Image (spheres, rainbow, N blue to C red):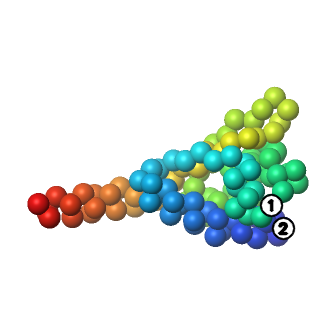
Amino acid sequence: MPRRYKGWKNWSIALRKRMYQDRCTETTVTVDEVAEGLGANPAEGIGSKRFWDACRDGKGNFDTIAKQGLLIEFEPKADGTVKKVTFRLNQTWMDHFHRVRERELTKVASSY
């Protein structure tokens, strides 16, 4: 990610952990929530379609979210701004998530 947003890796890992804790493979957050987590200002481009296109495509300096196993979806407004972003586990993390859930269920079932 661009140098001005240094917290992307930690933020992405924290988001993935939260998804596991909430037992969900997908979550939608506002751009303001993302900016708050990063200490960024949404007015500095983090709320633009262009920014989220680059993150979704994971090219160049914008590959951090993809490297942390998250896929990105969003619907830009008519003016090109993005208000909400959906993050989904990629296939590798989805497989891991299901293995963890199966172990949890097996552990609960065996305790009866």
Residue drawn at x 74%, y 41% is 83
In the image, farthest residue toward the right:
44
* Circle 1: element type: loop
Q: Amino acid at mark 2?
A: Arg
Q: Earlier in the sequence, mark 2 or mark 1?
A: 2
Q: Amino acid at mark 1?
A: Ala
Q: Is residue 49 above or below residue 41?
A: above
Question: In which quadrant of the rendered view does residue 79 lie?
Answer: top right
Q: Nearer the viewer, residue 85 or 53?
A: 85
Q: Is residue 101 above or below residue 10?
A: above
Q: Nearer the viewer, mark 2 or mark 1?
A: 1
| 42 to the left or right of 96 | right
Q: Is residue 69 above or below residue 75?
A: below
Image mark for residue 40: 1
Crowd rating for badge 1 (residues with CA inside 10 Å; few <14, some 14–19, many 20+): some
The answer to whether mark 2 and mark 1 are in CB contact below 8 A is yes
Q: Nearer the viewer, residue 24 or 64?
A: 24
Image spot of residue 99 (x, y percent): 33, 60
Residue drawn at x 62%, y 58% is 66
Image spot of residue 68 (x, y percent): 58, 64
- Distance from disc 2 to disc 1, alpha carbons, whole Å, reads 8 Å
| 54 to the left or right of 106 | right
Q: Quadrant of the N terminus?
A: bottom right
Q: In the rendered image, which residue does mark 2 sit on?
A: 4
Using the rendered image of the protein, determine whether residue 88 is visible from the camera's viewpoint: yes
Residue drawn at x 75%, y 56% is 35
Residue drawn at x 14%, y 64% is 111
Crowd rating for badge 2 (residues with CA inside 10 Å; few <14, some 14–19, many 20+): few
Q: Quadrant of the C terminus?
A: bottom left
Using the rendered image of the protein, determine whether residue 64 is visible from the camera's viewpoint: no
